[in-house]
Image (tube, rainbow, N blue to C red):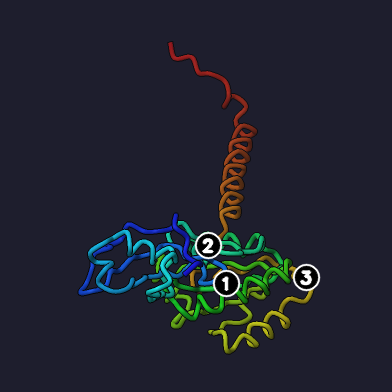
Amino acid sequence: MNVLQKRSRSVCSAGSTGTRRTICFARPSTATLGATSQCVLVAGPSSSRRNPDVAQQWAWGVRQDHPARLVCRAGERAAGSEPWWAKDNPSNMKDINSIQELVDALAEAGDRLVVVEFYAQWCNACRALFPKICKIMADNPNVLFYKVNFDDNRDACRTLGVKVLPYFHFYRGAEGRVAAFSCTISKLFMFREALENFSSPFCSLEPSPGLKEFPSLVPQRQQQGQGQQGRQDSGEEADSEADMHPLADTPTVVG
């Protein structure tokens, strides 16, 4: 019980049930139980019901005559702790919040290999695999890794063929998407093999084709270029008209 920290005691219900008193903890010691577990301590016999101070002594590990029972519920994030999908992200890992943002990211990547993971915060398989993916990405800084939250992009994910989680897409330059598969922690070798197959140096002569499932979406920089070209064309037309009509830029006196 010495692993519990007094300052982390939660205000969640401390009411008694029968002859036992339940005390909740929001943050156990990370060295023993991990920062993402919520622990509930069921303290001792009926004396805790009659005297809350006694229950608190059991909670902080002071009373050893009646050992308390500690129940931990994994998967519930402790208050103030970093969520698992944002923990230990290497510099080449980025969140993608829309399909337009993904199209832009693929265009900016050039010939670099891009790995896109479709995940959900509630997905246990995603959570179990993620620390290993972070380590692999840290060891491959030339590979770009983008995360797409399924719940925030459900329709787009379905259009992209995502039916199970976690799911991965591999993109490389003008080749577009070169691989798509589901991978859990027991099939991590599939991810490693795909990374090895497609991360070799590559030079394409054409730009990224974007996403074939969304042909109407083009990179924003391309949209800006088209707008500038349109304005330039309009200027050239105006110049040609001025050449055809020498007095076109001369004010006309009407009275």
Between residue 114 and residue 64, name the one nearer to us.
64
Name the image quarter holding residue 222.
bottom right
Q: Which residue is mark 1?
A: 116
Q: Secondary structure at mark 2?
A: strand
Quadrant in which the C terminus appears? top left
Q: Earlier in the sequence, mark 3 or mark 2?
A: 2
Q: Earlier in the sequence, mark 3 or mark 1?
A: 1
Q: Residue at x 23, y 74 (%)?
A: 19
Q: Residue furthest left?
A: 18
Near mark 3 (Cα within 10 A), the count class, few <14, some 14-19 or many ≥20, is: few
Using the image, tell me which numbered label, if any, was put on residue 203.
3
**Can you see residue 220?**
yes
Kindly indicate whether the residue at mark 2 contacts the one at mark 1 (C-beta within 8 angstroms).
Answer: yes
Whole-angstrom CA distance, mark 3 to mark 2, is 25 Å
Dot in front, 3 or 2: 2
Between residue 118 and residue 251, name the one nearer to us.
118
What residue type is disc 2 on? Answer: Ile
Residue 18 position within the rendered picture, expressed as x and y whole percent measured from the top left: 20, 74
Q: Residue furthest front?
A: 65
Q: Which residue is mark 2?
A: 96
